Image: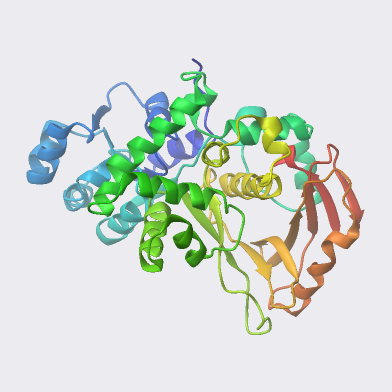
Amino acid sequence: MDYITRDMESLVQELTKEYSCILVCGPRQVGKTTMLKNIMAENRNVISLDDLEERKLAKTDPAMFLTLHPAPVLIDEVQYAPELFSYIKMAIDNGAPAGSFWLTGSQAFKLMTLAQESLAGRVAVLHLSGISQKELYGTGNNSPFEITLQAVQERKENRQSADANRIYERIFSGSLPALLSGKFTNRNVYYSSYLQTYISRDVKDEIEGVNETQFLDFIRACACRTGQLLNVHSIASDVGVADQTAKHWLEVLEKSDVIFYLHPYSNNLLKRTVKAPKLYFFDTGLVAYLSRHSSPEILLNGAINGAILENYIVSEIRKTYLNAGEECYLHYYRDKDAKEIDLIIEADGLLHPLEIKKTASPNLAMTSSFDVLKKAALPVGMGAVICLKESLTALDGNTLVIPVWTI
């Protein structure tokens, strides 16, 4: 089993020199603790609140907990003891040196809320997702994905090229370190166990008396709609729950980072836009498992092949921003006249429209909806078609053709 170097490592080390507290949040089993253990100094204490005795002490007597486990310390699954945050704040206010507290947790919304309430201005919050395509198949430093010819050419020089078959192998394999490192080899058993652990630990804390089988069916119904506009009623009907229940369950999936949304781009000049968000999963391997695709070849030719490719590309672009510790302004566009743009990146005062296509032969007709952004409040920058073509090229002076493997 080999450790996979994470792009966020250098950022954590840099911020540790400046902040007394670093909080790394993200989905379960994406390697938060493993990454921190790999780069930490030998004198740092490591405590997991999965240990029920440690959790009890942290909740009932946080002062004693921190006395027994002095800084520098790594506290894993810190969301189980929110009582610690006010005592960490006091330690920082009393002069705790840079790098004193490293915290991890798998409930990002809860943790970020706690951090904002108790540690505002005292903590650097980072969001780690699954292993990125670049971490597996690239070299050099990570940087947020940019739509300029120079930036894409630079990425191209430090990435491993892949044809359609290899791209779908990457999609099918997913992004969870335990599988990609070879620690576990039976993916069906792994994903089944992953979901059971997630439901028993996280879901039951949020939804009292939840029917585990029904909730698993709910996740599966969501996976079959990845890359689509969110239709709560449709998902609720499939599973046999009320719309309000489905909304609450979606909130739980989002809070625990299993899913994320792409929200529509709109402003006062674009009044006919669709308002529903698009649904994506953090891990395409989980989507493939839930939608019962048994091989990359079947996935490549299956009913969700275009949608899961879109999920993969959006999540990979998102990771390039998260791993750099930068805000990620991603949107999509769809209006009531059926004009659609799969992805819009807002960066440096420009809007970059992107089409995502399961093709190796893109054409300008695929970008016909880009013109709607001329009415937007911000100017339009370089656009692109991200597709299965293996080489970097362009359709015209304003539209690049970007291979998926360069992200």
Residue found 27% across the figure and 61% down from its top: 117
Q: Which residue appears farthest toward the right when viewing the image?
A: 396
Can see residue 97?
no
Instruction: Give the position of the C terminus as an image quadrant.
Output: top right
| In the image: residue 227, left or right of residue 219 | right
Residue found 28% across the figure and 27% down from its top: 44
| In the image: residue 69, left or right of residue 265 | left
Tell me where residue 122 appears, x and y as whole percent.
31, 53
Could you say which is closer to the camera, residue 325 or residue 234?
234
Snapshot quadrant of residue 21: top left
Tell me where residue 178 appears, x and y as whole percent.
46, 25
Tell me where residue 364 appears, x and y as whole percent.
90, 59
Could you say which is closer to the camera, residue 345 or residue 229?
229
Tell me where residue 250 appears, x and y as whole percent.
42, 58
| In the image: residue 402, left or right of residue 6 | right
Could you say which is closer to the camera, residue 229 or residue 119?
229
Residue found 44% across the figure and 38% down from its top: 12
